[in-house]
Image (cartoon, rainbow, N blue to C red):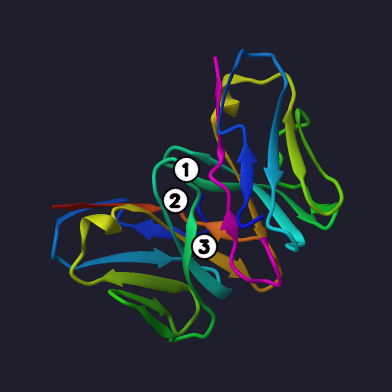
């Protein structure tokens, strides 16, 4: 059983469309991170959110941490083929140092 | 180094053989983590090092798995008597002061 549930598992969209990926848990986290992984590479950190209700924007990517610190979302505006990859959310429990990862969302942006 | 380096990048081994996977973390990063990634399963925690000590080995799947870290730097993950279910990508990450992880590119292990 995954501590963090990501949805959808797969997402295929046309270039220029918007997309949202969700990360949900029954546990409360001190922080939540989003990573993107490309084939043959390790995950790369995109953002860390630490405050309930926090919204962070990185160019076309918007990250939100839920008020209750149990969920997060990643929204991509006007997706580009370069956004293709596996998106992973990871939660840092209050009493632990190691991150728990979701199973990931595979995003494919078609040109 | 500038990033986390893992070697080999690919390893094919016969069932029953031992393998060693190496991780060279970012200089100065005291925390080092090993994760295993299987298709559709997400990242599975294996072991955590703080300096040279491993306060949490709870993720190691069996006693065939062991890891060490020397000089607060390089870590080696050893799998003895490999089984086909050990096939996966083994990822190493390092971090500093509760910041996000920096991952290596991983070692893809295939047991035939």
Q: Which residue is identified by label 3?
A: A90
Residue B109 lies in the magenta-colored region: yes
Q: Residues within 10 Å of mark 3 (few under 14, many from 20)?
A: many
Secondary structure at badge 1 equals: loop
A88 or B100, which is in the foreground?
B100
Q: Which residue is identified by label 1?
A: B41
Q: Residue visible at 53% across and 48% down?
A: B43
Q: Which residue is identified by label 2?
A: A103
Calculate the distance from the C-alpha at mark 3 to the C-alpha at mark 2: 10 Å
Q: Residue visible at 13% across and 52% down?
A: A111
Q: Quarter of the image holding residue B67?
A: top right
Asked if residue A35 is positioned above or below residue B87 in the image, the reply reads below
Residues at marks 3 and 2 on the same chain: yes
Marks 1 and 2 close (CB-CB < 8 Å): yes
Q: Residue visible at 58% across and 59% down?
A: B102
A26 or B54, which is in the foreground?
B54
Marks 3 and 2 close (CB-CB < 8 Å): no
Secondary structure at badge 3 equals: strand
- Which region of the structure is painted magenta? B95-112
Q: Residue visible at 69% across and 43% down?
A: B23
- Rendered location of residue A15, percent (x, y): 14, 59
Secondary structure at badge 2 equals: loop
Q: Quarter of the image holding residue B31?
A: bottom right
Residues at marks 3 and 1 on the same chain: no
- Rendered location of residue B90, percent (x, y): 59, 39
Numbered label tally = 3
Q: Quarter of the image holding residue B89?
A: top right
Calculate the distance from the C-alpha at mark 1 to the C-alpha at mark 2: 5 Å
Asked if residue B91 is positioned above or below residue B3 in the image, the reply reads above
Which numbered disc, 3 or 2, marks the residue that appears first in the sequence? 3
Left or right, B77 with reference to A101:
right
Left or right, B14 with reference to A63:
right
């Amino acid at each position: 059983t995954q501590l963090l549930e990501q949805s959808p598992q797969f997402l295929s969209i046309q270039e220029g469309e918007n997309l949202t990926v969700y990360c949900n848990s029954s546990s409360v986290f001190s922080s939540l991170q989003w990573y993107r992984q490309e084939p043959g590479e390790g995950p790369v950190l995109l953002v860390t959110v630490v405050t309930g209700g926090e919204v962070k924007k990185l160019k076309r990517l918007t990250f939100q941490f839920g008020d209750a610190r149990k969920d997060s979302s990643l929204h991509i505006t006007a997706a580009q083929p370069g956004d293709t990859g596996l998106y992973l959310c990871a939660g840092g429990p209050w009493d632990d140092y190691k991150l728990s990862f979701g199973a990931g969302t595979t995003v494919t942006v078609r040109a | 180094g500038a990033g986390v380096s893992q070697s080999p990048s690919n390893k094919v081994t016969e069932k029953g053989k031992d393998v060693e996977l190496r991780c060279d973390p970012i200089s100065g990063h005291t925390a080092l983590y090993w994760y295993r990634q299987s298709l559709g399963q997400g990242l599975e925690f294996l072991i955590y090092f703080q300096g040279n000590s491993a306060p949490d080995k709870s993720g190691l799947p069996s006693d065939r798995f062991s890891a060490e870290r020397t000089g607060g730097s390089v870590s080696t993950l050893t799998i003895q008597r490999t089984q086909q279910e050990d096939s996966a990508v083994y990822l190493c990450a390092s971090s500093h002061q509760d910041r996000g992880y920096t991952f290596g590119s991983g070692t893809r292990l295939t047991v035939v």
